[in-house]
Image (spheres, rainbow, N blue to C red):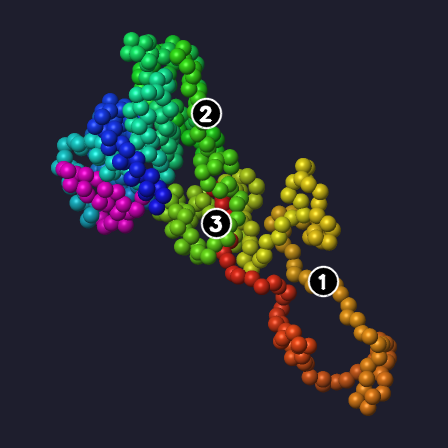
């Protein structure tokens, strides 16, 4: 609901910008187009509308739809009429869409088209970045390098370097130094002594394990940008890898609610692509958790309570708790199993004698105790005023059953 509200607010705010600041729309559409080339893998022939048409007619588009890359559904205006495709739609529906696209020699791309089609693509901030770009450039009070938001997809980051001179006669920036660290590849790289245009679009392919750092130094100022790695433990976007949570949702319900398998082929659970796994001892080879911990399986917490270790930070942590408050198994490792146990104790008796039915004393020493056969078991019957004992095969506290899930990517 919160993301929907943000989207609505952005659309309302930018409706004003579209009419009052058309040059911003032109600039920011280049940002969005660059992101879509990266997101779809389209071949860039120099005509975005033609390239998008070719993509829509391809088998790759149908595969991307079926795999949920565009979310549950996608609405595409064709001849001014919105046409909605769903990930689970029939072959006939896809063929109908292709026929409509083939009847169009070129697609009419407008701001409304972006708004209708790309506002809710999962795993990207395409339209949010587009809107924020427009708002930033429309702000006439800002000069110099403007803080245009990066466009981020699962595999790429698209940077927009936009410079606004204080007066129109001021020279544009000249490049002194440029570097993008930890990117697998970078396109449209500025070179030393190059004079930048007012808007420069730079696309970088991501390594999911590494932060991307962009540095651009010019004679008019410096631009520095950092994008957290997709699987970064320092990212504050999500809970870090290795976090264990409790839930009342079944794994199927949890997958749906958390969009857990959105990046997996066919939206099926895989250790390599899914974000969470049940704590049931399953194999998670090739997951981020496995790479960090060298452990090939999730902890098996089925039927278990969790207990804190005696020390969380043995180097700089505070002094240990009192011995009576610690786990008596002092050298446990995280994830280790501990059997249930009952504290050692003894029963006190006022006299060292038992009474027979005829009131004769009976010795209660181990070597002089009498023995009886066939005595009925009265365990659980006599309650001494405290209620009937609850007997089981284990010692346990009162509890409520939950599911445990662990973050693996």
Instruction: Measure the alpha-carbon separation of dots 3 and 2.
Output: 31 Å
Assess whether mark 1 and mark 2 are in contact (beta carbons under 8 angstroms): no
Check disc 2: other Cα within 10 Å, few if <14, some if 14-19, many if 20+: some
Q: What residue lies at 19% left-to-right and 49% top-to-bottom?
A: 92
Q: Which residue matches tag 1?
A: 343
- The disc label shown at residue 277, or none: 3
In this picture, residue 166 sits left or right of residue 275: left
Q: Residues within 10 Å of mark 3 (few under 14, many from 20)?
A: many
Q: Which residue is mark 2?
A: 213
Is residue 86 inside the magenta stretch?
yes
Q: Where residue 197 sits in the image (x, y, percent)?
A: 31, 15
Secondary structure state at the residue bearing disc 2: strand
Q: Is residue 307 above or below residue 231?
A: below
The image position of residue 191, as x and y in percent, is 38, 14
Position of 151 with respect to 387 (left or right) is left
Q: Which structural element holds mark 1?
A: loop
Q: Nearer the viewer, residue 218 or 1?
A: 1
Residue 45 appears in view? no
Q: Which residues are magenta?
A: 71-91
């Amino acid at each position: 609901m919160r993301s929907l509200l943000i989207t609505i607010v952005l659309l309302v705010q930018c409706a004003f910008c579209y009419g009052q600041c058309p040059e911003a729309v032109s600039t920011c559409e280049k940002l969005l187009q660059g992101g879509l080339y990266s997101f779809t893998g389209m071949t860039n022939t120099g005509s975005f509308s033609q390239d998008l048409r070719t993509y829509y007619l391809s088998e790759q588009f149908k595969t991307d739809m079926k795999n949920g890359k565009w979310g549950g559904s996608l609405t595409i205006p064709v001849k001014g009429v919105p046409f909605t495709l769903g990930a689970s739609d029939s072959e006939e529906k896809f063929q109908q869409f292709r026929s409509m696209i083939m009847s169009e020699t070129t697609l009419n791309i407008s701001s409304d088209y972006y708004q209708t089609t790309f506002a809710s693509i999962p795993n990207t901030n395409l339209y949010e970045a587009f809107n924020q770009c427009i708002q930033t450039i429309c702000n006439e009070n800002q000069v110099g390098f403007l803080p245009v938001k990066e466009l981020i997809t699962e595999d790429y980051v698209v940077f927009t370097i936009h410079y606004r001179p204080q007066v129109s006669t001021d020279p544009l920036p000249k490049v002194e130094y440029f570097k993008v660290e930890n990117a697998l590849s970078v396109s449209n790289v500025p070179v030393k002594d190059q004079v930048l245009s007012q808007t420069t679009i730079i696309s970088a392919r991501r390594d999911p394990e590494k932060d991307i750092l962009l540095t651009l130094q010019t004679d008019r100022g410096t631009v520095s940008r950092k994008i957290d790695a997709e699987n970064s433990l320092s990212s504050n976007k999500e809970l870090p890898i290795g976090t264990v949570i409790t839930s009342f949702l079944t794994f199927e319900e949890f997958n749906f609610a958390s969009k857990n398998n959105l990046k997996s082929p066919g939206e099926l659970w895989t250790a390599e692509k899914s974000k969470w796994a049940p704590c049931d001892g399953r194999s998670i080879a090739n997951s981020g958790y496995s790479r960090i911990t060298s452990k090939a399986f999730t902890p098996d917490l089925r039927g278990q309570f969790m207990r804190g270790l005696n020390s969380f930070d043995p180097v700089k942590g505070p002094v240990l708790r009192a011995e009576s408050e610690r786990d008596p198994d002092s050298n446990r490792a995280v994830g280790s199993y501990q059997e249930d146990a009952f504290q050692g104790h003894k029963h006190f008796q006022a006299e060292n004698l038992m009474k027979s039915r005829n009131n004769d004393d009976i010795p209660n020493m181990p070597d002089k105790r009498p023995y009886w056969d066939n005595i009925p078991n009265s365990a659980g019957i006599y309650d001494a005023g405290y209620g009937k004992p609850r007997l089981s095969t284990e010692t346990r506290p009162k509890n409520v059953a939950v599911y445990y899930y662990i973050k693996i990517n």
